């Protein structure tokens, strides 16, 4: 079973240009996979596993393509802004990068976040970038590479000191993870800003199922 089901954020179909791709799963499916396929969260590729497996299927145009290791559109954009290869980006900063819409464009800085829930942010401005925690509320402002007091990094750090960059990134991410709460309804880790303490559940579950009180 794929780690992430449903539409894959940042996986833009090269055929139709839409962001509507879901995981393509091979092998004999169990009951859970059948249910997910009926809901359009995964696509079944058949019981015979081919030599080269396509990882995603576009629901809009039925194009099967790609692999899990391919960069998403946002990851490719971040690598381009840093002027490094995707492999270099992964070595220093990991994967799963997506645009942080709540902050993107503030003071000319391009912000990206990684992790689910978001655990780390990267802000890029010109040749510089900074590591920071993700925003926790709308309207919150965060200093970019040219205005903040924290260390400013460049592509040279990504290329020549990837393990140092990785250590800095993990220090921020691990601190953020310690603030997470567990939703008693969906059993998933939840960022504190999306957790309803009175219901011991995430906002999404409270909205869908109520707070559990009669």
Image (spheres, helix red, strand yellow):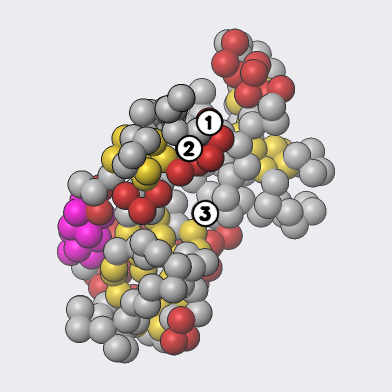
User: Could you tell me residue 181's position as x and y percent?
Assistant: 29, 40
Determine whether the residue tagged by mark 2 lies in a helix, strand or loop.
helix
Determine whether the residue tagged by mark 3 lies in a helix, strand or loop.
loop
- Verify whether residue 133 appears in magenta: no
Q: On the image, which quarter does residue 111 sit in?
A: bottom left
Label 2 vs label 3, nearer the camera: 2
Distance, label 2 to label 3, CA atoms, is 34 Å
Q: How crowded is the residue under tag 2: few (<14 C-alpha within 10 Å), some, or many (20+)?
A: some
Q: How crowded is the residue under tag 1: few (<14 C-alpha within 10 Å), some, or many (20+)?
A: few
- Verify whether residue 167 appears in magenta: yes
The residue lying toward the viewer, choosing from 90 and 6, is 6
Residue 121's place in the image compared with 187, above or below, is below
Q: Which residue is mark 2?
A: 206
Residue 173's place in the image compared with 132, above or below, is above
Q: Which residue is mark 1?
A: 209
Label 1 vs label 3, nearer the camera: 1
Q: Which residues are magenta?
A: 162-175
Q: Which residue is mark 3?
A: 71
Q: Give the residue at the far front of this rendering.
A: 214
Distance, label 1 to label 3, CA atoms, is 35 Å
């Amino acid at each position: 079973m794929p780690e992430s089901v449903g539409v894959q954020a940042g996986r833009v179909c090269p055929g139709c240009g839409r962001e509507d791709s879901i995981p393509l799963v091979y092998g004999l499916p169990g009951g859970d996979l059948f249910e997910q396929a009926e809901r359009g969260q995964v696509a079944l590729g058949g019981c015979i596993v081919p030599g080269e497996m396509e990882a995603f299927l576009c629901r809009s145009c039925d194009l099967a393509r790609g692999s899990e290791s391919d960069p998403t559109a946002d990851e490719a954009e971040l690598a381009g802004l840093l002027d490094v290869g995707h492999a270099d980006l992964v070595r220093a900063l990991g994967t799963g990068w997506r645009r942080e819409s709540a902050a993107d464009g503030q003071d000319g800085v391009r912000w990206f976040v990684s992790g689910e829930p978001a655990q780390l942010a990267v802000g890029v401005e010109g040749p510089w970038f900074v590591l920071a925690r993700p925003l926790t509320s709308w309207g919150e402002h965060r200093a970019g590479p040219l205005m903040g007091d924290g260390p400013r990094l460049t592509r040279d750090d990504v290329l020549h000191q990837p393990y140092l960059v990785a250590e800095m990134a993990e220090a921020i991410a691990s601190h953020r993870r310690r603030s997470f709460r567990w939703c008693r309804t969906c059993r998933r880790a939840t960022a504190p800003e999306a957790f309803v303490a009175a219901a011991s559940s995430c906002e999404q579950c409270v909205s869908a199922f109520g707070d559990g009180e009669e």
